[in-house]
Image: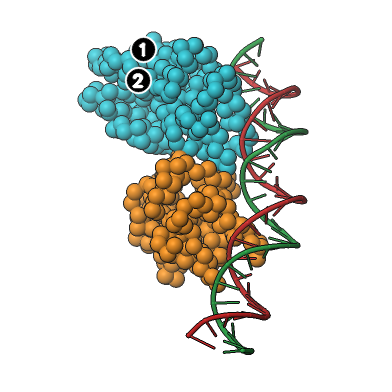
Chain colours: A cyan, B orange, C red, D green
Amino acid sequence: MRILIIEDEPKVASFIRRALEEESYAVDVCSDGIQGRDLASEIDYDLIILDLMLPGLPGIEVLKAVRDAKVATPILILTARSKVDQRVKGLDAGADDYLTKPFAIEELIARTRALLRRASGDSAGLLQIDDLILNPTNHEVTRGGQRIDLTSKEYALLEYMMRNAGRVLTRPMIAEHVWDLDFDTFTNVIDVYISYLRNKIDRGYDRGLIHTVRGSGYTLKLTDA
Amino acid sequence: MRILIIEDEPKVASFIRRALEEESYAVDVCSDGIQGRDLASEIDYDLIILDLMLPGLPGIEVLKAVRDAKVATPILILTARSKVDQRVKGLDAGADDYLTKPFAIEELIARTRALLRRASGDSAGLLQIDDLILNPTNHEVTRGGQRIDLTSKEYALLEYMMRNAGRVLTRPMIAEHVWDLDFDTFTNVIDVYISYLRNKIDRGYDRGLIHTVRGSGYTLKLTDA
DNA sequence: GTCTTCGATAATCAGAATACGCATGACCCC
DNA sequence: GGGGTCATGCGTATTCTGATTATCGAAGAC
């Protein structure tokens, strides 16, 4: 799986790169639009992540050029939160999904997975622990067949925990993955969200799945009544 | 396991500190080069994390001074992404690894573990002595397959002892590595925690693993019933 | 060479102090 | 109004303290 990142802010680019590399994707980065357009046309990437704010050639032009060249590779665009119209234009011009800055890295990884999966016509990839099932493609969560509604933060948190089930996840780890790039608050948001999740997922079941590891963090697993 | 962070940005320093503390490491922070150099020479740390951009004394000089003082402690340097030459100089001057800012905190933790592991000559993830097994990724401890619950101090103490199994660990050594800088010496906390550990780990087994070395300290090993 | 004594060191225990996690409700912003 | 965030206070697990009891080992007595 090979991914191209077209992004001029080095900070953001390297952050994304590292995250994707940890997921075992091969990653290329380029920082200007013209080079990006050329790379995208020459090399058969599985996914392109494109920042719309670019020097050289505007991202939207890169997008059009790539689609004009009949490249069908899925494209995920990054936009500033405010630029709604840009986003719309992007989707119109052939982008497959978008993400507004600042975004949680986990969110980006999730969407990356979804796009790659969609592209390869596959649809499996369910996450399951005990009778708790999470479907990343449609963000559906069930326990014992019962549907559970989660807000998007709750969902992101749960997906992260399920992908790392059994490991002890420290608060900084969770913050880094589920909250924003520049998360550095010393509040108890994470505790609060764990509590929300417990209410929705573990309440009423004799065997809880979310466990506190006092002094360290949290972990998701079976056993340990 | 005791780690020194030499970093002048309070935000970064405290973020790293928290993350490492949640991993049960004892952490000291200092914010200028000169003090850092002195601490590094005086105290026997297991790892030093050194920012190359420092007030007082440039990080690279700290590094050289520490190595000149024949301190073999692994050193992880932090550099700005752009400063490639700085990085190279750092490795030349005796650093063991580097990380470019900004970095994912997990990355830092992973490298920390890797360095500590490398230093202790071990290579797997699990620590094992006789039928006592400690798994650092999920903080799980078992003896003879039986799970053992430990508090985080107990865990930290045991991990330190297992990483130094066979060696006689003096009380000051244990205090330095498992407790923090401002350790109020000459209480018997350590004895107390050894006692707690014995209750949880050795009680009921004919062959105890924790041994007292009268007049010196404690050691963890097989044999010598 | 063995036994006893005695000071020094270590182990244990119970209670005090502290830190931690959690629930709850206020706040804010879209 | 709903989702997301933050602050407060409470109950409790954990950590620490200090006193008490147990153990060790060297030195002297027999």
Q: Residue at x 50, y 27 (%)?
A: A209
Q: Is residue B211 above or below residue D25?
A: above
Q: CA distance from mark 2 to mark 1?
A: 29 Å
* Tags 2 and 1 touching, CB below 8 Å: no
Residue A161 visible in the snapshot: no
Q: Dot 1: within a 10 Å radius of its alpha carbon, few (fewer than 14), some, or many (20 or more) residues? A: some
User: Residue C24: x percent and y percent?
Assistant: 72, 23
- Residue for badge 1: A93
User: Residue A104: x percent and y percent?
Assistant: 48, 28
- Is A35 left or right of B143, judged from the image as shown? left
Q: Is residue B203 above or below residue A152?
A: below
Task: Looking at the picture, tell me which residue is in the foreground, A109 or B212.
Answer: B212
Element on which disc 2 rests: loop
Q: Residue at x 44, y 31 (%)?
A: A165
Q: Dot 2: within a 10 Å radius of its alpha carbon, few (fewer than 14), some, or many (20 or more) residues? A: few
Q: Nearer the viewer, mark 2 or mark 1?
A: 2
Task: Looking at the picture, tell me which residue is in the foreground, B39 or B202.
Answer: B202
Q: Chain of mark 2?
A: A
Q: Residue at x 36, y 23 (%)?
A: A113
Q: Amino acid at mark 2?
A: Gly
